[in-house]
Image (cartoon, rainbow, N blue to C red):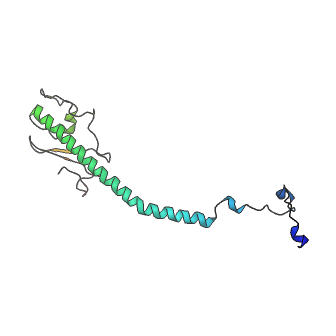
């Protein structure tokens, strides 16, 4: 046996204190991530967001449209109750506000016909458009996300 092989190296307990003057301390490479690893993770996250975000936004817009349609149906039911009590639908001047506040000169008004004290806004924060089409018909429309009439994204009952 070779005696030089049998010698073991004894580690110094304060190896970092024993470095020569003027040399920077060595960094422990297992303590962090490399730039390449971080870039790979960022690319993977960007790909996942690119695939998932359009679907989530699609669900959000379709759910707002469904919520607007349901609110229009609810307002229609309240207008039908108003019609049963008063004998006509609210005029264009009275609007949907007649469902929560008694219009002047009505003796048979038994409202409010909505649970809230105000007429709800559509899911985009705009007021519903109400039009009285004679004493026995009406139209309620949400103008959608752009809030403009005839924008192609209007929501009306079917």
Instruction: State how many labels appear.
Output: 0
In front of the other: 103 or 117: 117
Q: Is residue 28 left or right of residue 131?
A: right
Q: Quadrant of the N terminus?
A: bottom right
**Which residue corresponds to the image point at 82% horizontal and 58% vertical from the top-left?**
16
**Percent of width and height locating residue 65:** 28, 51
**Percent of width and height locating residue 94:** 18, 37
**Percent of width and height locating residue 154:** 24, 53
**Which residue corresponds to the image point at 23% horizontal and 34% vertical from the top-left?**
114
**85 lies above or below 72:** above
The furthest residue to the front: 1
Residue 64 visible at all: yes
Give the quarter of the image for residue 128. Answer: top left
**Percent of width and height locating residue 32:** 66, 59
**Which residue corresponds to the image point at 87% horizontal and 68% vertical from the top-left?**
6
Residue 128 visible at all: no
Give the quarter of the image for residue 133. Answer: top left
**110 lies above or below 34:** above
**Which residue corresponds to the image point at 27% horizontal and 44% vertical from the top-left?**
127
The furthest residue to the top: 107
**63 lies above or below 23:** above
The furthest residue to the bottom: 2
**105 lies above or below 153:** above
In front of the other: 68 or 117: 68
Give the quarter of the image for residue 125. Answer: top left
């Amino acid at each position: 046996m070779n005696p030089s092989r049998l010698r073991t190296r004894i580690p110094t307990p304060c190896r970092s204190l024993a470095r020569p003057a003027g040399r920077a301390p060595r960094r422990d490479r297992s303590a962090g991530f490399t730039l390449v690893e971080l870039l790979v993770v960022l690319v993977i996250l960007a790909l996942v967001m690119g695939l998932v975000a359009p679907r989530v936004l699609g669900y959000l817009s379709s759910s707002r449209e469904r919520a607007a349609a349901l609110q229009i149906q609810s307002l229609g039911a309240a207008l039908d109750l108003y019609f049963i009590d008063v004998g006509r639908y609210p005029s264009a001047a009275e609007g949907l506000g007649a469902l929560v506040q008694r219009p002047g000169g009505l003796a048979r008004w038994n409202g409010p016909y909505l649970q809230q004290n105000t007429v709800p806004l559509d899911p985009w924060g705009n007021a519903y458009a109400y039009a009285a089409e004679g004493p026995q018909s009406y139209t309620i429309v949400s103008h959608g996300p752009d809030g403009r009439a005839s924008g192609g994204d209007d929501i009306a009952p079917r």
